[in-house]
Structures are given as structure tokens and as C-alpha cells.
Amino acid sequence: MNKFSKTKRIRSVCSGIMSFAIALVFVWLPEQALSESLTKQVVTQHLAAFTIATGRPGSTHAQVGEIICNVYNRRRSENGARCRTAYSPGGRQQLTDMLSDKVQMAIIQSDVVAAAYSGQKQFNSNDQLRVLLPLHEQTIATVIRGDAPEGQFDVTSLTSKRVAMSASIRDGRYTLRRLFVSLGLDFVNVNGLIAMSPANQIQALCDDRIDVGFMLFGHPNGAIQQGIHDCKVRFVPYDFPHLRTVVESSRYLQMGEIPKGTYTGQTDDITAPAVATLLVTTDRFDLKTGKAFIEVLLENQSILRRLHRSLSNIDLNRRPALARQMKHFGEN
């Protein structure tokens, strides 16, 4: 082999080595760097933001959650974690997502929280739950047709009436049924209750297929407003001595009201049983971030009251019935 051929061969080998090295730089190293970058991004994202599970799009829970995040984000410290919201189909899914750390907080009514906390129904007992703050009330709406005789509808005895109640847990089915069972057969025939969504109840009232509908949610609600427009459905106060006795013995019920002016043509406050809506988290949520979040909201209650009708009477310092029995954020 002459000198020229040997030199050419060495150059060829060196060229191959260089090509492999270049490929390693452009393929392996970027992949490794990307992997490290993604890991850092996940960690940074976890530290920089937290998520509140709210409710269905357009629901009171969803609207309140967005308001809370907006108020907090505008007034948080420069390095404070950012608040964001995520829609959720209902309380059970919210709890599942929160306990698996997919979200860090959830807006849930106290009847669902009570079931989860004590292991009732489909929930397992879970003492990791912590109350951050009480929010708006969800008050039972008792509605009848607009042409029903004024003052002749007796809510203390519905045994001869065609009664509908919410079909889903998120609209109060569990709570309404337990309330009716506690009232006894002299007040309502539990076995004769018709399960319907709020929108279907309103339509059934307009069509004279039921006499009275019961729903549990935050107010105002679009289904009821539509019923007022279509066939002038109206509210009946759901308040009498035996009912108050049942409410007072409940772990999570309290007497609430739908303030006058909440709906078109509503000239009086409507009194009825209610559940508190709670902002909850777990004992794993960052203590510093949680305390800063609570502090900002407490300092800006007056702003919250102006941003949504359901928050007009909000008192973040109060302790609803269930909240007095549960651990609050920061308590071991």
C-alpha cells in the first residue's frame, strides 16, 4: 500500500468517526436535553401554578372559580403561584382528580364533601381533605306553575302532588332524597318522586305534567330564568317548623335564601334549606402557597361580592355546619 492510499484510508476512518460523533451530538444530546427540559418544565409548572376544579361550563361553580382565580392572580405577590381553573362534571370526579393530584383544589357542595369525608355512598373515608374557605350557598329552589292559585300551595304536605326532583347528584338528588326521607311519608311520597334534570322539570311544569319541582344549585340558574320567561314559573318558600328541625339536626344543611331580585320579577327573599359550597384541598397542598391564597381572598371579599350575584353575601370567615366538623387547611 503506497503512502497516498494509506493516508486516504486514515482520512476515511476519521471521517466515519466524525460523522458518528456529529450524529450523536444532533440526535442523542438534543433528546437528552429535551428530556431534561421537560422534567424541569413539569417541576417548574408544579411550583408555579395550581388548579381549581370547578364545575360544568357556565355553571355557578365554574363562574365563581374563574372569579376567584382572577382576583387572586391580580393581587398575588410577584413570585406567587398562579391560579387556574379546570371544568369538571361533578363533585365525585373533582374529589378523584384532587386526591390523585391532577388538580390541587375543588369547589364542591358540602353534602358531597360530607359523604366523602365520612365514607358514605360511593366514597371511601378520606381524612386528607381540608377546608380552605366557605363560598356561596346552594339553596333549594321549589318552583310551581305561574297559574297555580296564589297562597293555596301547601308545601308542608306534598303526598297528593306530582313531585319532581333533580336526577343527578350534582343537582342535589342525594341531598333532596335524604331530606324528604327525614321529613317522613306525611310530607312527601318518596317512592313517587320523579327524577328529572332542572331543564326537564321546568318544561314539565310548563306542560302541566308535574305540580312542583325541587332543585339544588347556585343562583341564578338559566333553567329557572327560562321557565319564568316561558310560562311564568314562580318560587314557593320551603320553610316550616318540622323542616327546620330536620335541617338543624343535619351535618351539612342550613337555612338559606334566594335574595329578592335574583330572578326576573322576584320581589321577595325565598327561604329554603341550603348547603354551603366549600373550597377544599388536601393536606399535601403547599402550606405557604395556601396561606398566601387565603390571605389575598380574605383581603378582597368586598371585590368578590360585586363580581357575582351568588357571592353578594359571601363571608369567608364564617364556619358552615360541616366546616366546623372538618379539619381546615394547615391543621394536622
Image (cartoon, rainbow, N blue to C red):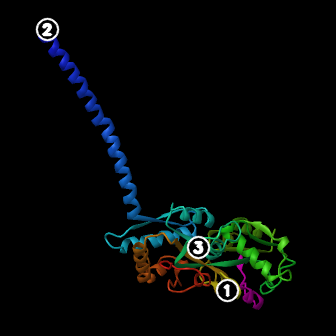
Residue 24 makes an appearance in the image:
yes
Q: Name the residue under label 2.
A: 2
* Residue at the extreme top of the image, as rendered: 1
* Residue at the extreme front of the image, as rendered: 1
On whether residue 102 falls in the magenta region, the answer is no
Q: Is mark 3 on a helix, strand or loop?
A: loop
Which comes sooner in the sequence, label 3 or label 2? 2
Q: Name the residue under label 3.
A: 127
The amino acid type, in three-letter code, at marker 2 is Asn
Q: What element carries label 1?
A: strand
Indicate the quadrant where residue 59 lies: bottom right
The amino acid type, in three-letter code, at marker 3 is Asp
Give the spatial CA distance, label 3 vs label 2: 84 Å
Give the spatial CA distance, label 2 vs label 1: 106 Å
Q: Is mark 2 on a helix, strand or loop?
A: loop
Q: Residues within 10 Å of mark 1 (few under 14, many from 20)?
A: many
Please state, as top left, top right, bottom left or bottom right, where the N terminus lies in the image.
top left
